[in-house]
Image (cartoon, rainbow, N blue to C red):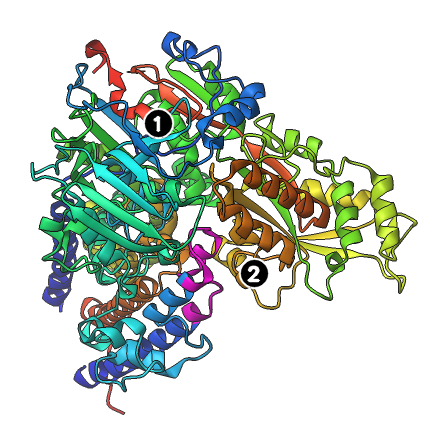
Amino acid sequence: MGRYIVRRSIQSFFLLWLATLISFTVYQLAPGGPIQFLDDDPRATSEDSNRLARLYGLDRPKLFPPAQYIAWLTGEDWLPKNETWRSGRCLSDESRCGRGILRLDFGRSFFYKGQPAIDPILERIPATLTLAVASLILGMVIGIPLGIVAALNRGRMPDHLIRVTTVLINTVPDWWLGLLLLIFLGGYLGLVPLSGMYDIGDGSLLDRLHHLILPALVAATGGWIGYSRILRFEMLEVLNQDYVRTARAKGLAERWVMIRHVLRNALMPFVTGFGGIFVLFLSGSVLFETVFSWPGMGRLFITAINSRDYPVMMAIFVIGSFFGIIGLLVVDILYSVVDPRVKYDVSR
Amino acid sequence: MKRTGRRSWLLLLLMITVLAVAAAQCGTAPAALENPAPSQEETQSAETESELPPEAIATEAPADENIAEAVADSGLAKEFEKGITVVTEEPDVSAPRTKKGGEYRDVSTSDAVSFHPYTTSDSASFAYQGLVWSGALLRLHEKTLEYVPHMAESYTISEDGLTFTFKLRQGLKWSDGQPLTAQDYKWTYDQVIKPENEFPYLDQLEFITSYEALDDHTLEIKIKEVYAPALGQMSGLITPLPKHIWEKLDWTDPEKNSEINSPSVVSGSYKLVEWERDQFAVFEANENYWYHGAPNITRYNIEIVPDQDVAYQKMKTGESDTAPITPEQLDEARQLENVNIYEWWPVGARWEYLGLNMRQGFPSHDINVRHGLSYAIDKELLTDEVMLGQAKRLCSIYAETSWAYNPDVECYEYSTDKAIEAFAKAGYTFKDGQMLDKDGQPLKLKLIYGPNTSKVRELIAVTVQDFLKEIGVEVEIQALEWASFLDAIKAQEPDWDIFIGGRGSTPEPHTGSVWWSEENIPDLNSVAYINKDVERLFVEAAATYDLEVRKQKYGEIQQILAQDAPYIFLYYQKAWSGQNKRIQGIEPTILGIGWNSEDWYIEEAQQ
């Protein structure tokens, strides 16, 4: 087990480095840049744009800029004092040099003028976390009973009904469903708020739940459909196992057979699903947050992309990758704990 | 083994619980956001509609057909006089407003970046800043359109026209009660001009040679040479920041200067109470506001919404007092029972055009091709189809709402015959429904537009494609995301023939000069238009205070540009605003509705 963890950690570290390289290169190569938006503004001349580009260090080559990558990774403060290695800000004032992501400095946002790139991300995490956890819980609360009912009524009306409904809902894109429900329930019936996390001047628990219910329900759609279908499949599989027959033969009450033998084993694959939650927490759900005007990471990511805010874009990507990779590692390890059949470090 | 399994489930359960609790705890208290009423400096002309409230109908806002006349007769078209002193007609601004109370609920589709007026360049930030900062020495009078003293009580122009002296009003105050003086203006100016301080429009201050505070109430600004737009440009050039608060803080770094995102001392009509990014901002009336004290409406909330449709729904349901209205929604909005629609033709009109690539090697390098394309598009029909009657034809760079407007320019009335004739002059042959070049190859053009989400531009692109098909020109359309679009039009070696662009104008015609200078290729002058006569005429028009001379020069410029056809000018737009009927005191004028927003009020029963 120890060796496995070390090996997987090294792999994870390599993956993370690869993620930084990819994000840096891809984002730098995207057309346009943060200064671009001044080009259409008659108040700013070419001279103004060039001056700002020099200050921000955006006047350097875009295609595979190793010096900029090294500066972003390790900081500008120790690099040679010239324009190849340092941005104009760092050259004019040492205290404004970036310290590099290895020292947890993701640079300064271009869009949120001068603010550390990590700040807007930290501000948005609670909102994304709230939506992610709420949708996960709702997904399980709805999906697991449906899966059980479908499995126990295999081939009968409840099973058909659940399967047809899930297939139908699954064919509709979640964000579109969200938009429809928003217009109908919010716009026409006025049952749910049209946007935001809470009302201005309110913010009570009830108000927050009122705002959360529709986004969470819609974000949970994929979850409960998936859970119900997986659970139905797994339960049907487990129901045919010898140990279930044995348990019944022993005269164990059906309820206990279901809970202790069937359900417990059928739920095993769900553990892997939790790995994804780490990614969800930080990358946010771009579409849901946009549709529901939910102030989380997803919307921040869209804003950063649209404004070519490289530091924020890259910070979200790197942090998301970090938690995603760590999440998968943790799940792998957890899986071995939960499922005794999974063994690592088998000596050969 | 069983025990291990149970423990693992417990662990998972615990994780979920912890995360759920953390999420519930993490939600922070609310704050507020942007989208203030239009600023006082807003420059628009107004047309009233029958649905307007009585006080609106009673205003003197001219109907749209009289706009050109009204502008020509107004102070905008007034010559500057050297060696004069102009004193305010409203010396006493201390009488408080009397209809106080209530809350104005605004919505916006984008949040502000910060409250720093010298590092931001986005309209959402300008809107927020307009509520908390005030600094205009002069303002455009809502009826005469003359520059009149505002925070200054008087201004003097020297005999040579190069020195401008502003006397500030007595009793100007910051929200903390400290006096707002000429030293605040001077200190702010000194910070702004430092190149490392990242002011995006530094070049705009180039014409100033000295900016001095002679005493606490006197500002003296000197300029290099006679420059016609000087007075207007100076009036709102520097919005002072409170020196007594800011001088101890960093200018650009929000980590070292909390005032940037949360200003504690302000000069505007409102103070920031709370700002929750991407959610909302809440402002409250500033009792120390210099102009008759606090505004009537006590609170001002701005809520961020995902898009215009949601904003419009909120106005419909009464959740907000205003919302942006698209041209398609306008007819319906006029019928809403709870909303008044105000409409006007802005003096600073927004106009749309097709930019033609004039670089060597592109078909539209040839002036005859440009003329051919101009004739081939029915601009009247396009305007009607795209803007549903909310826009008017444009033939050159100034709309008829500008005092510099010249009606005597070539307008390229729709004619496929003339289009084919012009193409023939360029060596093309129209045969079997195709426009063939000298080598017998059919002419294909690439049209780009952005942002790709713009329905209006999509409609323009498709309409242009249809019209050009009629003269055998095939058009390939490419829709781009906004940054990519800007990147494409300013590329050193562009691959497009036509792009759809839009321009915002101001009452001062000189601001349009930057689009036509060779040194701004490819940034602002993306079509690569080079005509030294036009550049010279712009310089000459700005270098005199003689209005007749200026008018004549701008007239010539319009003729040359219409003749050279670097753009196909399409239309200029009407402006409109929807406001909940509970908001009273709105007086539409030639400047729009925002000029007196501090006097708007809500009847007590509706507060």
Residue nearer the viewer, A21 or B49: B49
Total numbered labels placed on residues in the image: 2
Boundaries of the magenta span: A26-47
Residue identified by numbered label 1: B594
Left or right? Give the position of A109 relative to B81: left
Question: How far across and how far down the image is residue B520, in percent?
Answer: 53, 60
Question: How far across and how far down the image is residue B445, in percent?
Answer: 73, 55
Residue identified by numbered label 2: B488
> The disc numbered 1 marks a residue on which chain?
B
- Going 35% across and 74% down the picture, which residue do you hit? A19
Residue nearer the viewer, A259 or B75: B75
Name the residue furthest right.
Answer: B431
Name the residue furthest left.
Answer: B177
Is residue A28 rendered magenta in the image? yes
Locate the C terminus of chain A and report the quarter of the image it occupies: bottom left
Is residue B559 rendered magenta in the image? no
Residue nearer the viewer, B59 or A85: B59
Question: How far across and how far down the image is residue A65, in percent?
Answer: 41, 80
Q: Is residue A149 visible?
A: no
SS at badge 2: helix
Q: Quadrant of residue B257?
A: bottom left
Q: Which mark is residue B458?
A: none
Sooner in the amino-acid sequence: mark 1 or mark 2: 2
Locate the N terminus of chain A and report the quarter of the image it occupies: bottom left
Left or right? Give the position of A135 relative to B161: left
- Going 25% across and 66% down the picture, which residue do you hit? A323
Q: Residues within 10 Å of mark 1 (few under 14, many from 20)?
A: many
